[in-house]
Image (cartoon, helix red, strand yellow):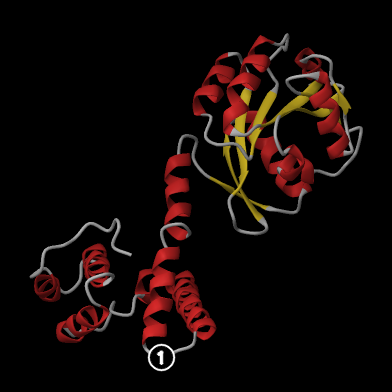
Amino acid sequence: MGSRFKYGVLGAGSVAKSLIGRLPAKTRDLGPVSAVSFRVASRIANTLRAGRAARTANELNDAAVVLFHSPPDQAGVLLEILESAEIHWPGKALIFCDCDDLRGAQARFDARGASTAVARQFGIPGSIVVAGNGAALTAAHRIARELKLKAIEILPGATDLFDAAVTLGNSAITPLIDCAAALLRQAGIRDGEAARIASALFSQTASEYARSGKQSWAWYMRKPQAERIEAQIAAVGEGPGPVLRQLLLFGLETFDKYPDVRRDLQDLPKPHLTSEL
């Protein structure tokens, strides 16, 4: 692209802890580092141990790829700085690294002729999620290779769907693991062992799903006994009991199995999942 540097940085917050900070510290790869002030830019460059502090964001024009990182409360200010900078965007790539969803910002820079992408860590070691277009998406994949990470590419605009899956797989499931551990403790198992068993049960289920998909569901080929389910729901009581009922109904409905068991379980009103655990 005729640029002096492979990468330039516009950042705020813990830039060194983002994907940017994990890039190999090669001065020839990382050029101008810009921020809300020269002092902040100098601090970021020092923590990165690469690049040089830029007096203004105009210097990012010397980079083929602009890497952007900011916490949500500072993103608006940085985006204003970037939009006001004298940068020739056609042919240039802009990658939002470990940022919350900035689709509106991406669209504005796309309109200026840039290609844009997002690259984020999402909790699975050795992997990042990427989405975008053109040279920016290519650069995001290159960054993954440089960091020896697996890039999981999703469709542009599918961030909310991906994040919902991540939330379901961590924040939403943790209370259920805690509930299972509590039931094991009530059954007489010591605290530490109860936590380990609960964790192992969920891990085993996830591993089996990775191998067999929906067929790993315990009841996919074997019809459950409604009376045994009712006994379990009754045993756990008014707290998690209704939640257990609704989760089991959700499974039966999701896999479209055993309508007679569903009818039996629907005899009692279904509660909302909130505030039950």
The residue shown at (39%, 68%) is: 176
Mark 1: few/some/many CA within 10 Å (<14, 14-19, 20+): few
Is 90 placed left or right of 257 in the picture? right
Residue 202, image x, y percentages: 45, 74
Is 46 placed left or right of 156 in the picture? right
Q: Which residue is mark 1?
A: 188
> Which quadrant of the rendered structure holds the C terminus?
bottom left
Outermost residue, bottom side: 188
The residue shown at (40%, 77%) is: 182
The residue shown at (68%, 58%) is: 126
Q: Is residue 250 above or below residue 221?
A: above
> Which quadrant of the rendered structure holds the N terminus?
top right
Quadrant assignment, res 131: top right
Is 39 placed left or right of 141 in the picture? right
Quadrant assignment, res 55: top right
Residue 130, image x, y percentages: 59, 42
Can residue 134 be seen from the camera position used here? Answer: yes
Can residue 32 be seen from the camera position used here? Answer: no
Q: Is residue 223 above or below residue 33?
A: below
- SS for tag 1? loop
Residue 275, image x, y percentages: 30, 58
Residue 221, image x, y percentages: 27, 81
Outermost residue, right side: 27
Give whichever of 251, 211 is nearer the camera: 251
Give whichever of 268, 112 is nearer the camera: 268
Is 76 placed left or right of 226 in the picture? right
The residue shown at (41%, 91%) is: 188
